[in-house]
Image: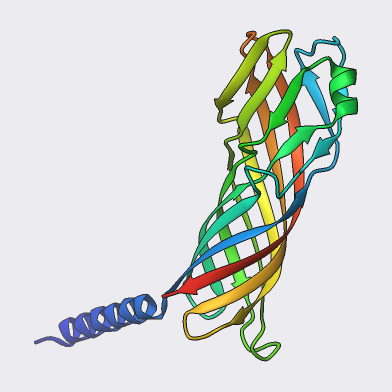
Amino acid sequence: MTQTTVGARAAAAALAASVLAGAAAAEDEIGFYLGVQESPHSVVTGDIPSGDDFTAGWEGRSFEAPVYYGFRWTRWRSETFGWGVEFTHSKVYADDETLAESGFERLELTDGVNVLTVNAMRRWPGQWGPVTPYVGGGIGVAIPHVDVEDRGQKTFEYQLTGPAARWTAGASYPLGDSWSVFADYQGTYSMHTMDLGSGGTLETNLVTNAINLGVSFSF
Protein backbone atom coordinates (compact mmCIF):
# COMPACT_ATOMS: atom_id res chain seq x y z
CA MET A 1 0.00 0.00 0.00
CA THR A 2 1.49 3.34 -1.03
CA GLN A 3 1.90 6.32 1.26
CA THR A 4 -0.53 8.23 -1.00
CA THR A 5 -3.21 5.56 -0.53
CA VAL A 6 -2.66 5.48 3.23
CA GLY A 7 -2.90 9.27 3.37
CA ALA A 8 -6.09 9.34 1.28
CA ARG A 9 -7.74 6.72 3.48
CA ALA A 10 -6.72 8.56 6.60
CA ALA A 11 -8.14 11.82 5.23
CA ALA A 12 -11.39 10.08 4.27
CA ALA A 13 -11.66 8.52 7.73
CA ALA A 14 -11.07 11.90 9.37
CA LEU A 15 -13.72 13.53 7.17
CA ALA A 16 -16.24 10.79 7.95
CA ALA A 17 -15.53 11.09 11.67
CA SER A 18 -16.03 14.85 11.46
CA VAL A 19 -19.37 14.49 9.65
CA LEU A 20 -20.60 11.86 12.12
CA ALA A 21 -19.50 13.98 15.07
CA GLY A 22 -21.35 16.97 13.62
CA ALA A 23 -24.51 14.89 13.10
CA ALA A 24 -24.29 13.53 16.64
CA ALA A 25 -23.86 17.06 18.02
CA ALA A 26 -26.89 18.46 16.16
CA GLU A 27 -29.87 19.30 18.35
CA ASP A 28 -33.42 19.79 17.10
CA GLU A 29 -35.67 22.21 18.99
CA ILE A 30 -39.39 22.67 18.37
CA GLY A 31 -41.15 25.63 19.97
CA PHE A 32 -44.70 26.96 20.19
CA TYR A 33 -45.65 30.41 21.42
CA LEU A 34 -48.50 32.81 22.06
CA GLY A 35 -48.17 36.51 22.69
CA VAL A 36 -49.28 40.08 22.19
CA GLN A 37 -48.87 41.52 18.68
CA GLU A 38 -49.60 44.92 17.21
CA SER A 39 -48.89 46.65 13.91
CA PRO A 40 -48.17 50.35 13.26
CA HIS A 41 -49.95 52.34 10.56
CA SER A 42 -49.13 51.66 6.90
CA VAL A 43 -49.89 53.35 3.60
CA VAL A 44 -52.37 51.49 1.37
CA THR A 45 -52.43 52.06 -2.39
CA GLY A 46 -54.36 50.57 -5.30
CA ASP A 47 -58.07 50.25 -6.12
CA ILE A 48 -59.72 52.06 -3.23
CA PRO A 49 -63.45 52.99 -3.01
CA SER A 50 -62.64 56.56 -1.96
CA GLY A 51 -60.26 56.91 -4.92
CA ASP A 52 -57.32 58.08 -2.79
CA ASP A 53 -54.38 56.35 -1.16
CA PHE A 54 -54.70 56.35 2.62
CA THR A 55 -52.83 55.53 5.82
CA ALA A 56 -54.43 52.57 7.56
CA GLY A 57 -54.62 52.20 11.31
CA TRP A 58 -54.37 48.54 12.32
CA GLU A 59 -55.54 46.63 15.39
CA GLY A 60 -53.91 43.34 16.41
CA ARG A 61 -56.55 41.88 18.80
CA SER A 62 -54.12 39.10 19.73
CA PHE A 63 -56.44 37.18 22.05
CA GLU A 64 -59.56 37.25 19.87
CA ALA A 65 -60.20 34.16 17.74
CA PRO A 66 -58.25 33.32 15.68
CA VAL A 67 -55.54 34.06 18.25
CA TYR A 68 -51.98 35.16 17.54
CA TYR A 69 -49.51 32.23 17.66
CA GLY A 70 -46.35 30.80 16.13
CA PHE A 71 -44.25 27.66 15.60
CA ARG A 72 -40.46 27.51 15.41
CA TRP A 73 -38.13 24.63 14.49
CA THR A 74 -34.40 25.09 14.90
CA ARG A 75 -31.58 22.64 14.18
CA TRP A 76 -28.65 23.69 16.34
CA ARG A 77 -25.56 22.67 14.37
CA SER A 78 -23.32 23.59 17.30
CA GLU A 79 -23.69 24.92 20.83
CA THR A 80 -24.05 28.44 19.47
CA PHE A 81 -25.36 28.39 15.88
CA GLY A 82 -28.45 26.95 14.21
CA TRP A 83 -30.86 27.34 11.34
CA GLY A 84 -34.54 26.51 10.98
CA VAL A 85 -38.03 27.40 9.85
CA GLU A 86 -40.69 29.55 11.55
CA PHE A 87 -44.36 30.27 10.94
CA THR A 88 -46.23 33.13 12.62
CA HIS A 89 -49.97 33.75 12.49
CA SER A 90 -50.36 37.48 13.21
CA LYS A 91 -53.37 39.66 12.42
CA VAL A 92 -54.38 43.16 11.35
CA TYR A 93 -57.86 44.68 11.42
CA ALA A 94 -58.49 48.11 9.89
CA ASP A 95 -59.89 50.39 12.60
CA ASP A 96 -63.19 52.26 12.26
CA GLU A 97 -61.53 55.53 11.20
CA THR A 98 -59.67 53.72 8.41
CA LEU A 99 -62.84 52.08 7.11
CA ALA A 100 -64.66 55.41 7.09
CA GLU A 101 -61.80 57.15 5.27
CA SER A 102 -61.20 54.44 2.66
CA GLY A 103 -64.79 53.39 1.94
CA PHE A 104 -64.14 49.68 2.55
CA GLU A 105 -66.73 47.77 4.52
CA ARG A 106 -64.11 45.22 5.64
CA LEU A 107 -60.33 45.35 5.41
CA GLU A 108 -58.61 42.58 7.36
CA LEU A 109 -55.85 40.00 7.29
CA THR A 110 -57.19 38.04 10.22
CA ASP A 111 -56.59 34.41 9.48
CA GLY A 112 -53.89 35.94 9.38
CA VAL A 113 -50.88 37.85 7.96
CA ASN A 114 -49.06 34.43 8.03
CA VAL A 115 -45.30 34.88 7.68
CA LEU A 116 -43.12 31.84 6.87
CA THR A 117 -39.32 32.25 7.02
CA VAL A 118 -36.05 30.34 7.00
CA ASN A 119 -34.03 31.55 10.00
CA ALA A 120 -30.44 31.74 11.21
CA MET A 121 -30.13 31.63 15.02
CA ARG A 122 -27.31 32.47 17.46
CA ARG A 123 -27.31 31.64 21.18
CA TRP A 124 -24.95 32.07 24.14
CA PRO A 125 -25.34 29.16 26.60
CA GLY A 126 -23.82 29.67 30.04
CA GLN A 127 -23.67 33.45 29.76
CA TRP A 128 -26.36 34.10 32.38
CA GLY A 129 -26.26 30.89 34.38
CA PRO A 130 -29.19 28.67 33.33
CA VAL A 131 -30.69 31.45 31.17
CA THR A 132 -29.62 31.29 27.51
CA PRO A 133 -29.97 34.50 25.44
CA TYR A 134 -30.46 34.21 21.70
CA VAL A 135 -31.04 36.29 18.56
CA GLY A 136 -32.21 35.34 15.11
CA GLY A 137 -33.38 36.56 11.76
CA GLY A 138 -34.87 35.15 8.61
CA ILE A 139 -36.34 35.77 5.18
CA GLY A 140 -39.34 34.17 3.51
CA VAL A 141 -42.83 34.89 2.25
CA ALA A 142 -46.18 36.28 3.38
CA ILE A 143 -49.27 34.11 2.82
CA PRO A 144 -52.14 36.16 4.29
CA HIS A 145 -55.83 35.41 4.31
CA VAL A 146 -57.24 38.45 2.54
CA ASP A 147 -60.64 39.52 3.82
CA VAL A 148 -61.88 42.64 1.99
CA GLU A 149 -65.40 43.85 1.20
CA ASP A 150 -66.27 46.80 -1.02
CA ARG A 151 -69.88 47.56 -2.02
CA GLY A 152 -70.84 43.89 -2.09
CA GLN A 153 -67.64 42.69 -3.80
CA LYS A 154 -65.87 40.24 -1.46
CA THR A 155 -62.34 38.85 -1.36
CA PHE A 156 -61.97 35.98 1.10
CA GLU A 157 -58.99 33.73 0.35
CA TYR A 158 -55.35 32.89 1.04
CA GLN A 159 -52.85 34.56 -1.28
CA LEU A 160 -49.08 34.61 -1.74
CA THR A 161 -48.57 38.36 -1.61
CA GLY A 162 -44.83 39.01 -1.39
CA PRO A 163 -41.53 38.64 0.48
CA ALA A 164 -41.16 38.87 4.25
CA ALA A 165 -38.47 39.08 6.93
CA ARG A 166 -38.31 38.61 10.70
CA TRP A 167 -35.96 39.44 13.57
CA THR A 168 -35.97 37.99 17.10
CA ALA A 169 -34.21 38.52 20.44
CA GLY A 170 -34.98 36.65 23.64
CA ALA A 171 -33.91 34.11 26.24
CA SER A 172 -34.80 30.57 27.26
CA TYR A 173 -34.80 28.77 30.63
CA PRO A 174 -34.58 24.97 30.98
CA LEU A 175 -37.27 22.99 32.83
CA GLY A 176 -35.35 19.73 32.44
CA ASP A 177 -33.20 17.86 29.96
CA SER A 178 -35.61 18.39 27.04
CA TRP A 179 -38.16 21.08 27.94
CA SER A 180 -37.60 24.84 28.17
CA VAL A 181 -39.65 28.00 28.40
CA PHE A 182 -38.73 31.13 26.47
CA ALA A 183 -39.69 34.76 26.03
CA ASP A 184 -38.72 37.03 23.18
CA TYR A 185 -39.42 40.15 21.20
CA GLN A 186 -40.13 39.52 17.53
CA GLY A 187 -40.70 41.82 14.60
CA THR A 188 -41.73 41.06 11.03
CA TYR A 189 -41.80 43.05 7.81
CA SER A 190 -43.98 41.82 4.96
CA MET A 191 -44.86 43.20 1.52
CA HIS A 192 -48.36 42.60 0.18
CA THR A 193 -49.83 42.91 -3.29
CA MET A 194 -53.36 41.59 -2.85
CA ASP A 195 -55.74 40.63 -5.66
CA LEU A 196 -59.31 41.75 -5.11
CA GLY A 197 -62.48 39.98 -6.19
CA SER A 198 -63.43 43.11 -8.13
CA GLY A 199 -60.38 42.63 -10.36
CA GLY A 200 -58.24 45.33 -8.77
CA THR A 201 -55.32 45.17 -6.34
CA LEU A 202 -54.29 46.62 -2.99
CA GLU A 203 -50.71 47.13 -1.88
CA THR A 204 -49.26 47.76 1.57
CA ASN A 205 -46.16 46.89 3.61
CA LEU A 206 -46.80 45.70 7.15
CA VAL A 207 -44.62 45.72 10.25
CA THR A 208 -45.59 43.68 13.30
CA ASN A 209 -44.13 43.87 16.80
CA ALA A 210 -44.79 41.09 19.29
CA ILE A 211 -43.85 39.88 22.77
CA ASN A 212 -43.92 36.08 22.81
CA LEU A 213 -44.07 33.50 25.59
CA GLY A 214 -43.55 29.88 24.65
CA VAL A 215 -42.40 26.37 25.41
CA SER A 216 -39.89 24.27 23.46
CA PHE A 217 -38.83 20.63 23.28
CA SER A 218 -35.31 19.55 22.29
CA PHE A 219 -34.22 16.14 21.03
Q: Nearer the viewer, residue 88 or 140?
A: 88
Name which residue lies at 69% across and 69% down. Answer: 183
* The image quarter in which residue 24 lies: bottom left
Residue extending furthest left? 1
Q: Nearer the viewer, residue 120 or 57?
A: 57
| x and y percentages locating residue 28 in the rendered image | 44, 70
Name which residue lies at 67% across and 52% down. Answer: 166
Left or right, 45 with reference to 91:
right
Colour scheme employed for the rendering of this structure: rainbow
User: Against 101, is 115 above or below?
Assistant: below
| x and y percentages locating residue 138 in the rendered image | 61, 54
Q: Which image quarter is the C terminus in?
A: bottom left
Name which residue lies at 74% across and 25% down. Answer: 107
| x and y percentages locating residue 152 in the rendered image | 69, 8
Residue extending furthest bottom? 129
User: Against 24, is 109 above or below?
Assistant: above
Q: Which image quarter is the N terminus in?
A: bottom left
Name which residue lies at 86% across and 34% down. Answer: 57
User: Against 194, is 190 above or below?
Assistant: below
* The image quarter in which residue 133 lies: bottom right
* The image quarter in which residue 112 lies: top right
| x and y percentages locating residue 95 in the rendered image | 84, 31
